[in-house]
Image (tube, helix red, strand yellow):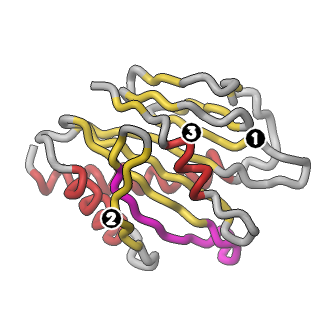
Amino acid sequence: MSFRYYICDMQKKLLALISIIFCLLGCQNEGDHSEIKKENNKEYTSDSLHFGITPLLNWSIKVKENKVGILENYTDSKDSFQENIVVWTEEMPIAISDSLYNKATITELKIKNPKIEVVALPSKKLGKTNFGRFAFTVFLNDSIPCKVLGYTAVKGKRGYNFSCSYLANGNTDYTPIFENILSTVKLIQ
């Protein structure tokens, strides 16, 4: 598999992820939420995605195809957005460094979404995992700002992607909450 094909394949996956974040997880304000599993602060392990994570007590796990969503439970009947972390992995033809994988992810975002301003952030160690990081804001319904924090990691030939989303028009910065959850990540070979 050529590097060019790999980058094109990554672009398709990232576009699909962004669609899934907002369509399936973030804006579920009506309907049956029975697919959501309560985890009671126990570690969740995905054998197919090769990782483990421990959500907070008021967060739930939702598995959809080859992605895992960690969602904050609705706080009241007026709550229309579930802050969330979406996790997916991709197999790479060769092992690359964490920083190169993060740069490729940011480049892919910029190519597929030229109107968004992606900001590269310094890498950060959370728990036992070193994460590459980036951030951007998108607008839901053309007016509601939604902050997306991206975290990437690599183990061997597997790239891990963690996309964290929250409404940016409130008073809460979810970065410490997301990083608390991400500090529990275990990458499995």
| Residue at position x 52%, y 35% in the image | 68
> Residue type at mark 2?
Ile
110 in relation to 17, above or below: below
Q: Is the residue marked by circle 3 packed among few (<14), some (14-19), or many (20+) residues within 10 Å?
A: many
Query: Which mark is on residue 106?
Result: 2
Tell me if 45 is positioned left or right of 121 in this view: right
SS at badge 2: helix
Given residues 5 and 149, the one toward you in this image is: 149
* Marks 2/1: CA–CA distance: 29 Å
At which x and y percent is residue 123?
Answer: 34, 59
> Residue type at mark 3?
Gly
Locate the N terminus by quadrant. top left
Image: magenta residue range = 131-146
First in residue order: circle 3 vs circle 2: 3
User: Are the residues at dot 3 and dot 2 in contact (C-beta closer than 8 Å)?
Assistant: no
Residue beneath label 3, please?
69
* Marks 3/2: CA–CA distance: 21 Å
Residue beneath label 1, please?
73
Instruction: State which quadrant residue 11 falls in.
Output: bottom left
